[in-house]
């Protein structure tokens, strides 16, 4: 075994002892990052090239700093995004939410679909839609100054138009014209603070996580914003916590101008997002 692989094995044990949920993956990813190679190429790093900065990176992860803050990058669908302190790290469960949205927009058969991503954080959702839906016109909205700064770096050179503002009142110039509104908003109930993993609780911005006593404050506001923005027949897609699948579809009620409200699971078969269609009068 070469030196690096032996160090990775030791690091894996340290991360496991610290309670890191995916210790081998993280130990390998940090080694790959520090040595500037892919994860599948670690065995090729010569013993003389072992870089002791690996152990600095492992110590940070052991203290439960998010992996993506240490490497400065997050992978989301086909994208590599810049992330760090001050912005929510995009999560794998959101990838399936975006997958559903991409299929829904393609099925609309609109030539230049107009899409709005509310609460964009790093810009992950907006950028994935711009990349995967041909000729889409994508707008992204973020309130927090720090997160907006990261999104601005990520959208540079893309087709995404970024706006700084409150999702609930944003982009009124698009009212009644939008084909798809999508959001992964803050949705954790304040009462669950102590159960949130240290990586999120201590490193993701509070504005990205919590939303009132039951976690639904922002989603209730988004319901009105989506109704305002969508054209008749347009679709809203909202991510929620796996405990909220029984509540969120009721926010998009028929007597508030919605049709076909439904809830959907993620790849782990947990309730993850609600979709609804703005009713056609
Ligand atoms: C859970 S994070 C999701 C970020 C991104 N959509 C993703 O999936 O990675 C929620 C984001 O919503 C932003 N946010 C919270 N309240 C907002 C509001 N009223 N208007 C706009 N953005 C808001 C937070 O700053 C944070 O960036």
Image: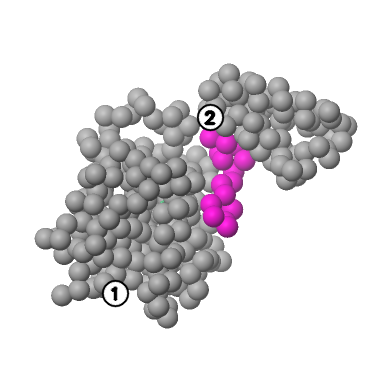
Outermost left residue: 255
Mark 1 lies on residue = 177
Q: Which residues are magenta?
A: 66-81
Q: Is residue 167 visible?
A: no
| Relative vertical location of residue 267 with respect to residue 235 in this rendering, above or below | above
Residue 61 location (% of width, % of height) = 58, 29
Name the quadrant containing residue 164.
Answer: bottom left
The residue at the point 53 percent across, 52 percent down is 76
Mark 2 lies on residue = 21
The verdict on residue 77 being magenta is yes
Circle 2 SS class = loop
Dot 1 alpha-carbon crowd within 10 angstroms: few under 14, some 14 to 19, many 20 or more = some
The residue at the point 34 percent across, 66 percent down is 180
The residue at the point 83 percent across, 28 percent down is 1
Outermost front residue: 269
Q: Is residue 232 visible?
A: yes
The verdict on residue 125 being magenta is no
Q: Which of the pair 146/244 is nearer the observer?
A: 244
Name the quadrant containing residue 170.
Answer: bottom left
């Amino acid at each position: 075994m070469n030196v690096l692989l032996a160090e990775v094995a030791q690091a894996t044990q340290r991360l496991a002892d610290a309670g890191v949920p995916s210790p081998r993956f993280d130990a390998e990813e940090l080694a790959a990052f520090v040595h500037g190679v892919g994860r599948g190429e670690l065995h090729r790093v010569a013993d003389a090239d072992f870089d002791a900065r690996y152990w600095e990176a492992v110590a940070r992860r052991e203290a439960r700093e998010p992996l993506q803050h240490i490497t400065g990058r997050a992978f989301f669908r086909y994208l590599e995004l810049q992330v760090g302190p001050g912005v929510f790290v995009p999560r794998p469960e959101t990838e399936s939410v975006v997958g559903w949205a991409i299929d829904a927009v393609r099925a609309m058969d609109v030539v230049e679909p107009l899409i709005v991503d509310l609460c964009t954080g790093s810009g992950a959702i907006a950028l994935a839609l711009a990349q995967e839906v041909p000729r889409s016109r994508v707008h992204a909205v973020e309130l927090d100054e720090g997160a907006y700064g990261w999104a601005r770096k990520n959208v540079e050179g893309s087709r995404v138009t970024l706006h700084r503002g409150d999702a609930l009142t944003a982009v009124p110039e698009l009212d009644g014209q939008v084909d798809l509104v999508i959001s992964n908003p803050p949705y954790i109930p304040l009462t669950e603070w102590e159960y949130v993993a240290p990586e999120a609780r201590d490193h993701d911005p509070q504005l990205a996580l919590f939303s009132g006593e039951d976690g639904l404050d922002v989603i209730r506001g988004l319901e009105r914003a989506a109704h305002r923005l969508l054209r008749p027949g347009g679709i809203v897609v909202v991510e929620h916590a796996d405990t909220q699948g029984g509540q969120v579809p009721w926010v998009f009620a028929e007597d508030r101008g919605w049709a076909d409200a439904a809830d959907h699971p993620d790849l782990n078969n947990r309730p993850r997002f609600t979709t609804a269609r703005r009713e056609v009068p």
